[in-house]
Image (tube, rainbow, N blue to C red):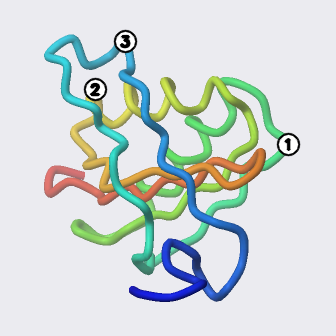
């Protein structure tokens, strides 16, 4: 994209990468380097919920999805960044990307093939 709205979605607020390494990834790979522009199969709004509720609701929502489908999770709890990374790693679901816009964290999780 080029122009005044480069790095913005629908001309809104700029998308900001989360540039920090999470404790769950000791290998030094940043699991959250992608600006989200993708669509999802299901959207889960966990804004206003505190730990561990965003993860618990994501687990329940993923259980209802078909293998390979993508869940979009919205959360406002800053702890959700590390919590979702750990959840994805332990459960085998793929954390496709993450972003933060203001105080809202957005995650895309793809359901793994084993349930």
Q: Nearer the viewer, mark 2 or mark 3?
A: 3
Q: Are marks 3 and 1 in contact (CB under 8 Å)?
A: no
Sooner in the amino-acid sequence: mark 2 or mark 1: 1
Q: Spatial distance from mark 3 to mark 1, Cα to Cα?
A: 24 Å
**Cα distance between the residues tagged 2 and 1:** 24 Å
Query: Which label number is shown at residue 56?
Result: none
Q: Residue at x 63, y 66 (%)?
A: 14
Residue at image coords 52%, 63%: 72
Q: Residue at x 50, y 72 (%)?
A: 7
Report which residue position mark 1 lands on: 48
According to the picture, the residue beneath numbered tag 3 turns out to be 23
Residue 101 as seen in the image, left or right of residue 2: right
Circles 2 and 1, Cβ within 8 Å, touching? The answer is no
On screen, 56 above or below 1?
Answer: above
Identify the residue at image location x=80%, y=38%. Answer: 49
Q: Residues within 10 Å of mark 3 (few under 14, many from 20)?
A: few
- SS type, badge 3: loop
Question: Total of numbered circles in the picture?
Answer: 3
Q: Residue lying at the far front in this picture: please name it.
A: 3
Q: Earlier in the sequence, mark 2 or mark 3?
A: 3
Q: Is residue 110 left or right of residue 38?
A: left
Q: Which residue is mark 2?
A: 90
């Amino acid at each position: 994209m080029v122009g005044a709205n480069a790095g913005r979605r629908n001309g809104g607020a700029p998308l900001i990468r989360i540039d920090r390494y999470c404790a769950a990834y000791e290998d030094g790979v940043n699991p959250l380097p992608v600006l989200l522009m993708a669509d999802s199969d299901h959207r889960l709004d966990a804004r206003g919920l505190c730990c561990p509720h965003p993860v618990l609701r994501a687990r329940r929502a993923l259980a209802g999805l078909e293998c390979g489908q993508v869940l979009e999770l919205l959360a406002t709890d800053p702890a959700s960044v590390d919590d979702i990374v750990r959840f994805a790693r332990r459960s085998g679901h793929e954390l496709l990307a993450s972003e933060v816009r203001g105080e809202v964290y957005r995650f895309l999780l793809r359901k793994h093939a084993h349930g």
